[in-house]
Image (cartoon, rainbow, N blue to C red):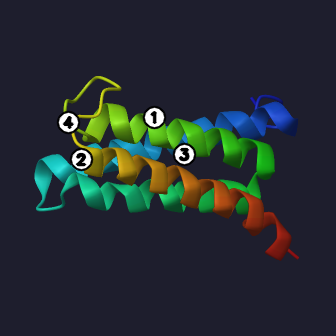
């Protein structure tokens, strides 16, 4: 089991784990509390920041793209599709992607 999470492959597996965790927590929050889907974006940004700092640039970039796709698929209407009904939602997805990519580029530079 330790071999699975060691090296570069393990970093990508952990990044996917962060994506699944953020999506699950977001689903739980939107179904059980007053949190709306727009607040779930912050969970994805947090997961990208964690991945960038601890896992490196490659896994963080992959997580940036997958986070944007997951947010679109699970939280933007119409649900369970990659279609976007409103221009505001398309702009939200673009901004999420740009912020996540910026974090992926900048976070490894501040690591000691």
Count of marks placed on residues: 4
Which residue in the structure is indicated by mark 1? Answer: 69
Which residue in the structure is indicated by mark 4? Answer: 77
What percent of the width, then of the height, locates residue 91?
Answer: 38, 51
Q: Secondary structure at mark 4?
A: loop
Q: Residue at x 76, y 35 (%)?
A: 10
Q: Distance from label 1 to label 2 (Cα)?
A: 18 Å
**Label 1 neighbour load within 10 Å: few <14, some 14-19, many 20+:** some
What percent of the width, then of the height, locates residue 76?
Answer: 26, 40
**Image quarter hosting the C terminus:** bottom right
- Tell which circle, 3 or 1, labels the residue nearer the N-terminal end: 3
- Closer mark to the observer between disc 3 and disc 1: 1
Which residue in the structure is indicated by mark 2? Answer: 28
- State the residue in front, 3 or 108: 108
- Closer mark to the observer between disc 1 and disc 2: 1
**Image quarter hosting the N terminus:** top right
What percent of the width, then of the height, locates residue 36?
Answer: 18, 57
- Tell which circle, 1 or 2, labels the residue nearer the N-terminal end: 2
Is disc 3 in contact with disc 1, using a CB cutoff of under 8 Å? Answer: no
- Tell which circle, 2 or 3, labels the residue nearer the N-terminal end: 3
Is disc 1 in contact with disc 2, using a CB cutoff of under 8 Å? Answer: no
Q: Residue at x 85, y 36 (%)?
A: 8
């Amino acid at each position: 089991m330790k071999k699975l999470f060691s090296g570069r492959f393990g970093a990508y597996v952990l990044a996917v784990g962060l994506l699944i965790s953020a999506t699950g927590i977001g689903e739980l929050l939107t179904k059980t509390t007053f949190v709306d889907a727009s607040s779930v974006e912050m969970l994805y940004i947090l997961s990208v920041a964690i991945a960038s700092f601890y896992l490196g640039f490659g896994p963080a970039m992959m997580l940036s793209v997958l986070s944007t796709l997951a947010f679109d698929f699970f939280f933007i209407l119409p649900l369970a599709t990659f279609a976007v009904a409103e221009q505001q939602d398309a702009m939200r997805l673009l901004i999420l992607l740009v912020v996540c990519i910026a974090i992926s580029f900048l976070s490894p530079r501040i690591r000691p």
